[in-house]
Image (spheres, rainbow, N blue to C red):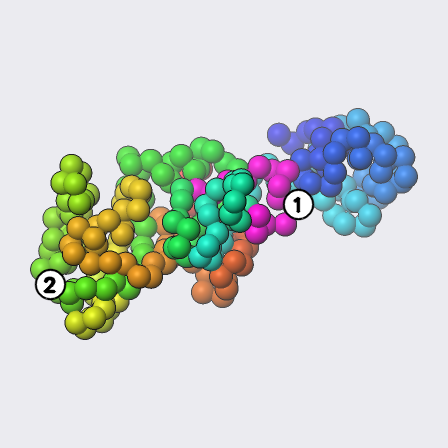
Amino acid sequence: MPKMRLDKLLANMGFGSRREIKADVKLGKITINDITARDASVVINTEVDKVQYLDELVEYKEFIYIMMNKPEDVISATVDKHDQTVIDLLPQKYAALSPFPVGRLDKDTQGLLIITNNGKMAHNMLSPKKHVEKLYYAIVEGDKLNANDITAFKKGIFLEDDQYKCLPANLSIIEANDKESKCELIIEEGKYHQVKRMFEASGRKVTFLKRMSMGPIVLDKNLDLGEFRELNAGEMALLEQYL
């Protein structure tokens, strides 16, 4: 969509409502190719024209792709009446683009969350047919994890009601003792509370859970909890297969 009206462009990029943009045009706050705009309805070529709002260059983006290190006690949703959402952590400039999280992390789970407004990409990353791997780091209480557990997860864990058998998962034990075990788990599904339920089915309880990667996207170690950034060119190239 390279061409659109000036007021729609600026409204879509979070600079205000169309009515507010029209008022700003009258006040001379907007320039197009270094010339003061006089008409809010003028058509802009987003690939060629340079639009500035109070000396801030307006970069049009139809789609956004954000990596967030989700903290605990924040829910993976767009709106909620009671809890803070991951969208609440984003600045207002993203709100006009209607972003949403790709899949969910439990309220008490932290780590990688991809946020976008590209429905096709989100659908492809979540589709069971794509077999997108998710890597989690977990700390679990209970019997010491061992080679038998690695084999059991590889065969497919039956969840607690024995009504569903999970796809094969790769369990790697980092360290383990009689009180707790630290491990990594790779799954290709995203059932409700799946990682927790898989360990519960083996008689253990997850006390800490963090998603480290999703498909080709790996959590940036420089992002503190609650921090985020847009995906860089290299990450976008890896994501290309889902676009």
Instruction: Choose top left, top right, bottom left or bottom right for residue 6.
Output: top right
**Secondary structure state at the residue bearing disc 1:** helix
Q: Earlier in the sequence, mark 1 or mark 2?
A: 1
* Disc sitting over residue 147 in the figure: 2
At a point 33% along the width and 35% down the height, the residue shown is: 127
Q: Give the range drawn in magenta.
A: 88-102
- Picture coordinates of residue 94 (x, y %)? 62, 44
Inter-mark Cα distance, 1 to 2: 49 Å
- State which quarter of the image contains the N terminus: top right
- Picture coordinates of residue 204 (x, y %)? 20, 58
Which residue lies most toward the left here?
A: 148
Relative to the observer, which residue lies in front, 196 or 122? 196
- Picture coordinates of residue 175 (x, y %)? 22, 71
* Residue 108 appears in view: yes
Disc 1 marks which amino acid? Lys
At a point 83% along the width and 41% down the height, the residue shown is: 30
Where does label 1 land, which residue? 93
Disc 2 marks which amino acid? Ala
